[in-house]
Image: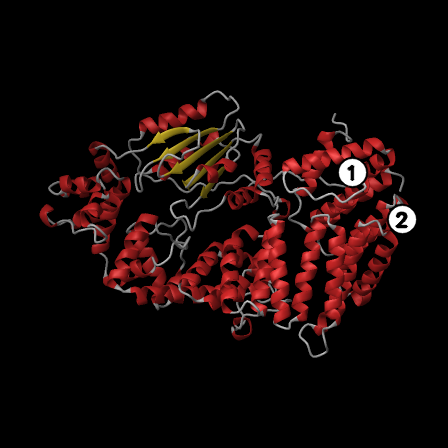
Amino acid sequence: MVDPASLTAITTVLGAVGGGLANEAGKAAWESAGVLIRRIAGREVQAPTDADQRAAVARVVLDGIRREPTLAAAWAVFAGGVPRSSPGAGVPQLLPFADRFFTDRKHPLKTLDQEYDRAFDGTPRAVLLHGPSGIGTSALAVQWGWREPSRFPDGRLYADLRGTSPDTTRDAASVLAHFLRKLGVADAEIPPATADRAERFRAEVASRRLLVVLDHAHSAAQVKPLLTAAPGVFTVVVARRPLAGLDLAAVPLGPLTERDALRLLTGVAGKPAVTAARAVLPSALARCAGSPFALRALAPRLAELPPAAQQFGTAGEGDTDDADRDPVRAAVHDVYRGLPPASARAYRLLAGRPWPWITAGPAGAALNVPQTEAADFLSQLAGHRLLDTTDGVRYAYRPSVRRHAEGLALREEGVAACAGAVRRMTKWLLEFAVTADRAAHPDRWWLGPLYTILPPGPYGEDQSAALTDLVEVLDVLVEAVRAAEELEDPATAWQLCEAMWAAQLRAGRHDQVLPALRVGVRAADGLDPDSRVAGRLHTQLALALMERQEYDAAAGELRTAARAESAAGHLRGRATALETLGLLRLRQWRHEDALGLFEEAAATLDGVGPDDEGHADLPRACALLRRHRGRALRGLGRRQEARDLGREALEYFRGDGRDPYNAGRTLTDLAEIEIDAEDYRAAVPLLDEAIAALAAQRADYHVDRLRAQRAACVSAGG
């Protein structure tokens, strides 16, 4: 049994508290850790942001509690009040469907089997499948993954890393968050730092028998945090080429032999169609060059092939000879030439951006056609294998296919028409996002004009449904922000960012929105760096950086936000930026700096006049600042002042049932002041009242933590 006062146990507690920073209860526990550690060390201790720093802080704690037994008892109470995360219980099945007709690939399949059966030696059980576009690397990974259903009873994880485009590549942090959610880990328990997410992922899969497929990988750096040496986990990495620095068994994939190409074509098209086309088969098979994608694209057109000399046109993009040597591009162009004019136009115009996926709504806007007509176009293109779909609702281009379509669009439609299609799609997405964001978070103020112009959406009072819709489309919205920047449309860029606020604040999707927020800040500053818009966007970016523990960068954004709000004459916004910077300093355990910022924010609010925006919200804003000032004073050991401010804040929040959630949090603050003073008897009734208040608000993580704290206090003599 591990000694609770050992270095290992202390480090584990700090890791558990740091891993819970995604939820408000975890942030409160982190803050309490900082208060106690300052007391143990007798000085300010900088909050750790990685494993090495946590180990150093744990050493400070160990040295302190060895010197002073009463501090050891206080640490034991704190550690006993930290609830441990529960393991996820999800059994994900994210692997796409396998292709029905599959041929050849005996050697690669055998290599996969051999690596899977390899005796465990502490290294990741993994392979790297690589080969050019359309050669079937992804199909092989999926085919193998489904071959033996009993191999992976705990599930199959799949992620498209989008490594074919530097702008759209997914980082490891967002993929880890996605995997943890699918494994059953609640959003509120997903750690903010990539290294901690990787550690939690490895802990979650340590005893599972699980398949992980990482498709379209770009680099070793993108893949390494997603690897695990768990003996029951098998990972298949799929890439266009070998990835330098990734020490995995490599499985190259080349073209099918002519015999196997004919076998695949016969399976997909049917024997009668192949027999009827025997006169033109040699040239058709040569054109496909052993590419499974090209063969599948050819199959529906076998009966319509003209004599060999007239069969094929040029690939229509770039250098003709080079294009014709690329079987995927050649096959795509052959299919394209047979499309009806309206479908061909849809194929061209929808390819203006590397959208993660396209649905009928935005497609209809881009094409200037009704949504039902756009849905038909998408279905037709998918039927010709020009688009991929797994559900008949979301459609996506393969990167090489999109490049072909985009090249055709620029030549046949012109730059203006292509830009117009993208512009109409981003406008549709902006209106969708504003409608969902407004319904998901109705009790906040907005700057974008569409919030007051657009009619009510379909959500009514169903905030959860609105938030779900917003989160589901988030990756597409991020690409829309990039598109708006390229179109030199900064107004659309920043408004799209503002419309992601509910997904960021209420769903915690800080990683997903971060690339868009960087663009949004540039857009807002380009329009007017001394505006409320700039202030809002810098604050929004700062919050995302805070959640990723990029504290210095977040502080810089908040200072910029405060300056912009001041220049715009918006005192309420300036106070918010200062208050947020104070909360950041609390997160860093810099209590004196935090107190100064909270006091500056309070002084700023004193200047808000009756006719100024935000005046109606002043009583609540001032109560929150009293609470925050009390938290900073508690960290400085000024307990009576902290009590007084906490009681003043509590009186406001309790009054007429104004804010039961913040009442519960303030009661928690007051209880923790008594715990700091080791007056556990005084803490217990405050904890009981806080539990009752927060349980009514369904703040489950808060309640779990408070119950653990209460038990620790009772055990200590409360």
Q: Nearer the viewer, residue 270 or 60?
A: 60
Q: What is the number of the mark on residue 80?
A: 1
Q: Nearer the viewer, residue 66 or 225?
A: 66
Q: Amino acid at mark 1?
A: Gly
Q: In the image, residue 426 lies at what x, y percent?
A: 43, 64
Does residue 706 appear left or right of residue 423 in this picture? right
The outermost residue toward the bottom is 611
Contact, mark 2 vs mark 1 (Cβ under 8 Å): no
Please, is residue 271 above or below residue 314 in the view?
above
| Residue depicted at 37% across the width and 57% down the height | 353
Q: In the image, residue 574 lies at what x, y percent?
A: 66, 66
Looking at the image, how many numbered discs can be counted on the residues? 2
Q: In the image, residue 7 lies at what x, y percent?
A: 73, 30
Does residue 651 appear left or right of residue 661 in this picture? right
Cα–Cα span, label 2 and label 1: 18 Å
Q: Amino acid at mark 2?
A: Ala
- The quarter of the picture where residue 577 lies is bottom right
| Circle 1 Cα neighbour tier, 10 Å, few/some/many (<14 / 14–19 / ≥20) | many
Instruction: Return the residue at label 2.
Output: 682
| Circle 2 Cα neighbour tier, 10 Å, few/some/many (<14 / 14–19 / ≥20) | some
Q: Nearer the viewer, residue 682 or 39?
A: 39
Q: Secondary structure at mark 2?
A: helix
Q: In the image, residue 654 lies at what x, y percent?
A: 81, 63
* Residue 465 can be seen, yes or no: yes
Quadrant in the picture for the C terminus = top right
Q: Secondary structure at mark 1?
A: helix
